[in-house]
Amino acid sequence: KRERGILFRDGPRIKWEEGGKKWFTTGDEKTQGKYEGEILDGVPHGQGTYYWFNVNRYEGGWEYGLFDGQGTYYSYPSGVKVVGEFRRDKEWNTLRYDKDGNIIEKIVRGKLKKD
């Protein structure tokens, strides 16, 4: 059953488990990434937001602890925004915008599209 909650990862002592990084129910927002949203079996699953301690963030779909589905990634202080479909923590079909809202890159099926 999905529930809402908060999880942490990506601290100075990244702990690896079989299949990837482990998520923790306690942590420090100053030194670790923080996830807020739907959780299933101890990992992000559903809709949620992940905050990097350097203030970048991803808002959108998650599947078994990875970015997956429609979402938006915000990069600060550059102001770059990536909008679209993510698959298994990677951009799949996305548009990348500069701080003024101009499209600067397009990713199609996981590859940079050259015009």
Image (cartoon, helix red, strand yellow):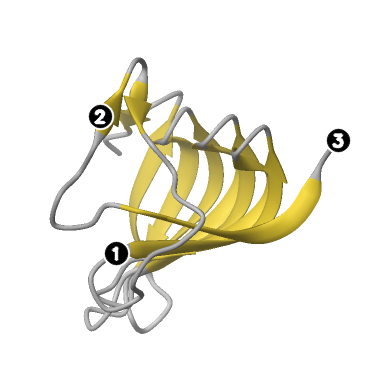
Q: How many marks?
A: 3
Q: Position of residue 45 (x, y in %)?
A: 67, 39
Image point 51% across, 55% down: which residue? 25
Quadrant in which the N terminus is drawn: top right
Q: Position of residue 99 (x, y in %)?
A: 33, 81
Q: Are discs 2 and 1 less than 8 Å apart at CB?
A: no
In what element is the residue under mark 1?
loop
Please rate how many residues cluster around mark 1, counting C-alpha atoms within 10 Å: few if below 14, some from 14 to 19, many from 20: many
Counting residues from the start of the chain, the first of labels 2 and 1 encountered is 2
Q: Amino acid at mark 2?
A: Trp
Structural distance between the alpha carbons of marks 3 and 2: 25 Å
Horizontal side of residue 88 vs 27, given as left or right: right
Horizontal side of residue 18 vs 23, given as left or right: left
Query: On the image, numbered disc 2 is attached to which residue?
Result: 16
Q: Amino acid at mark 1?
A: Gln
Horizontal side of residue 110 vs 50, given as left or right: left
Structural distance between the alpha carbons of marks 2 and 1: 15 Å
Task: Name the residue furthest front.
Answer: 26
Q: 47 above or below 59?
A: above
Q: Position of residue 37 (x, y in %)?
A: 67, 59
Choose between 80 and 15: the one closer to the eye: 15
Query: On the image, numbered disc 1 is attached to which residue?
Result: 32
Q: Position of residue 58 (x, y in %)?
A: 48, 60
Quadrant in which the C terminus is drawn: top left
Q: 77 above or below 104?
A: below
Q: Amino acid at mark 3?
A: Lys
Image point 25% across, 29% down: which residue? 16
Query: On the image, numbered disc 3 is attached to which residue?
Result: 1
Image point 20% across, 44% down: which residue? 14
Choose between 23 and 63: the one closer to the eye: 23
In what element is the residue under mark 2?
strand
